[in-house]
Image (cartoon, helix red, strand yellow):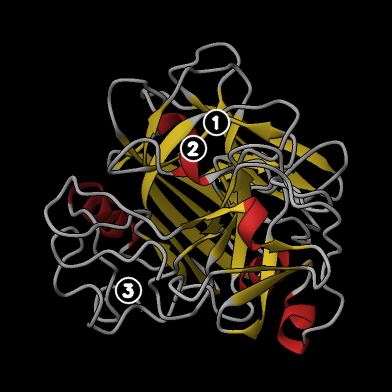
Amino acid sequence: MMNQAPAVLVSGASPDATPSPAYVGYWPMTQWTGAVGALTYNSITLAAATYVDTTNNWISGVTSATWLTAGVPFKIRPVGVIPAGLSSSLVYYAGKPTADRVQFHTTYADAIAGTNPVDITTQGTSNVVLYPAFIKDWSGNGNDMLFGAATSDLQAFATAPYMSNASSGANDNALGRLSAATFADAFVWPTSSMFVHFRVLFGTLVAGRSFWGCGNSSPAVSGPRMSVDSSDTSKLNLQFFHSGGTISLGASAAEACSTTVQHSIALGIDGPARQATIWIDGVRDLSLNQDSLNAAVTATMTGDLRIGGAYSTNAQAANFADYHVLTWVGGLPSNIDAVAAKLATVKYQRLMASEVA
């Protein structure tokens, strides 16, 4: 499967032990085989003239791609000219009329039913590469994240041991996106609380570019957003968008955004207490410590929760790993400081049910 992390990188306790029931998802972010540093991912390269069938709207020759099962999200990357009708900027769902053939569907339901395949009108030229377009969830919940529409395998796997995305002010270059439906079901404002953690090493910093969240001003989308601060690009800026406007919680005191130093960043949002807290490298940031969200009366999460961006036209180049998202009905756990401190020092290990309920 895509992004499978064996015990050489992930703690031996992690894949098998009982994870915290609070998890929405856990994405280690890398796929390793053998020794650390041997990075690989699933893909298949096929000659367009031989395998693209415009009569039946399928590509054949995929028997060896055992990962390409019915309903799997995948993308196509052309080496030459892409077959007409297909796009390298769309995530498709695999239809499998036979083990050796794949059709392109724009919805999971169509892929499973084998209906409405995309019409392929020309074969294209040279080769085409098919690859999985999701990041595997290791929480046990099956909440795999889809790639951003403009993110390709070449970008996502460019920098071991991370998964990476490019910067953009126009395209969906986010690394991954958790569906709005999944996020809205898990986090209901203000009766729920959430906690996120990830490790990040940034690419070239662009003031104001977002690297996590779902909130946006225009069009209006409720939810939190972390961005590179506009005044000091070494700091992160936190905002919370709601039906009545935007709460600007300000910039961190500590460095959070660096092109040379990896930082651990965690965010806790306590709905009942209406507070937001940031931890940088396991330590509460005093500038963003229990900042008030009292003004956010209504905030319905309607956007995909992105990492590497916060909306489909705003993404900051970065390299990510060790991404956790947990939610609770009610307030944050009393030991949340200890959780943030642990995740800052213990890498690639899920939180267990005994550690945080």
Is the residue marked by circle 3 packed among few (<14), some (14-19), or many (20+) residues within 10 Å? some
Q: Which amino acid type corresponds to the residue marked 3 in the rendered image?
A: Val
Q: Residues within 10 Å of mark 1 (few under 14, many from 20)?
A: many
In front: label 3 or label 1:
1
Q: Alpha carbon of mark 3 to alpha carbon of mark 2: how far? A: 34 Å
* Vertical order, 300 against 207 (above or below): below
Asked if the residue at tag 2 contacts the one at tag 3, i.e. Cβ–Cβ closer than 8 Å, the answer is no
Picture quarter with the C terminus: bottom left
Q: Secondary structure at mark 3?
A: loop
Q: Is residue 136 above or below residue 201?
A: below
Residue in the foreground of this view, choosing between 70 and 282: 70
Q: Measured along the vertical axis of the image, is residue 148 above or below residue 309? A: below
Q: Is residue 173 or residue 179 the one in the foreground?
A: 173
Q: Position of residue 356 (x, y in %)?
A: 32, 73
Task: Calculate the distance from the C-alpha at mark 3 to the C-alpha at mark 1.
Answer: 34 Å
Q: Does the image show residue 241?
A: yes
Secondary element at tag 2: helix
Q: List the residue tagged with mark 3.
A: 356
Residue highlighted by disc 1: 166
Residue extending farthest to the front is 50
Tell us which disc is closer to us: 1 or 2: 2
How many numbered marks appear? 3
**Among numbered discs 3 and 2, the one appearing first in the sequence:** 2
Q: Identify the mark at residue 155; answer none if there is no mark.
A: 2
Q: Earlier in the sequence, mark 1 or mark 2?
A: 2
Q: Residue at x 16, y 66 (%)?
A: 11
Q: Earlier in the sequence, mark 3 or mark 1?
A: 1
**Eye-nearest disc, 3 or 2:** 2
Q: Residue at x 54, y 69 (%)?
A: 61
Instruction: Measuring from the top left, give residue 40's x and y in whole percent.
Output: 31, 53
Instruction: Tell me if I can see residue 305 in this picture.
Output: no
